Amino acid sequence: MRVLVVEDEDLIRDVIVDILESHGHDVLEAESGERALELCAEASPDLVFTDVMLSGSLTGWDVAIKCRDSRPDVPVIYATGYAHTAPRPVSGSIMLQKPYRLERLLESIRLLTG
């Protein structure tokens, strides 16, 4: 499965990418919402994993909405470290509260993709 990981913190992104690759996933990585949109257009990921708050002008919500413009059924896992970030009721998505266990991320992928 091709997973797009959108995370602006390098260390966190590196750990997530390593874990997903070690579980057999093809991983695309983006350090910004803008780069994530380029990768969505170029590579059509099977799942998007995005931090909600990103540096730059786009949020994780924006990334998911725009990626779903071309592929409405793509599942999305949102992550946030902000307690005041209210989850938006988006079908085919899961919200993870940081810090989350990597097992929870893998379980979320299984739940969304069968």
Image (cartoon, rainbow, N blue to C red):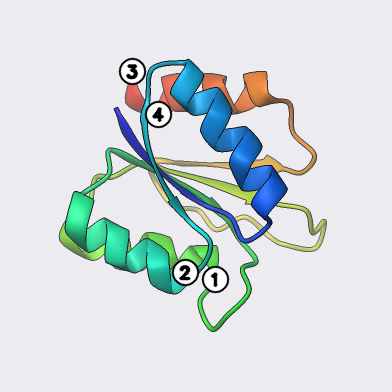
The crowding category of the residue bearing disc 1, from other C-alpha atoms within 10 Å (few below 14, some 14 to 19, many at least 20), is some
Looking at the rendered image, the disc whose residue lies closer to the viewer, 1 or 3, is 1
Between the C-alphas of marks 3 and 2, the distance is: 27 Å
Residue 3's place in the image compared with 85, above or below, is above
| Figure disc tally | 4
Do the CB atoms of the residues marked 2 and 1 lie less than 8 Å apart?
A: yes
Going from N to C along the chain, the mark reached first, 2 or 1, is: 2
The crowding category of the residue bearing disc 3, from other C-alpha atoms within 10 Å (few below 14, some 14 to 19, many at least 20), is few
Amino acid type, label 3: Gly
The crowding category of the residue bearing disc 2, from other C-alpha atoms within 10 Å (few below 14, some 14 to 19, many at least 20), is many
Q: Residue at x 24, y 45 (%)?
A: 73
Going from N to C along the chain, the mark reached first, 1 or 4, is: 1
Q: What element carries label 3?
A: loop
Which of the image's four quarters has the C terminus?
Answer: top left
Between the C-alphas of marks 4 and 3, the distance is: 6 Å
Amino acid type, label 4: Leu
Amino acid type, label 1: Thr
**Which residue has dot 1 on it?**
59
Going from N to C along the chain, the mark reached first, 4 or 2, is: 2
Do the CB atoms of the residues marked 4 and 3 lie less than 8 Å apart?
A: yes
**Which residue has dot 4 on it?**
112
Residue 114, numbered circle: 3
The crowding category of the residue bearing disc 4, from other C-alpha atoms within 10 Å (few below 14, some 14 to 19, many at least 20), is some
**Which residue has dot 2 on it?**
33
Q: Residue at x 38, y 17 (%)?
A: 24
The image quarter containing residue 75 is top left
Q: Which residue is drawn at 39% across and 62% down?
A: 36
Residue 16's place in the image compared with 42, above or below, is above
Amino acid type, label 2: Gly
Going from N to C along the chain, the mark reached first, 1 or 3, is: 1
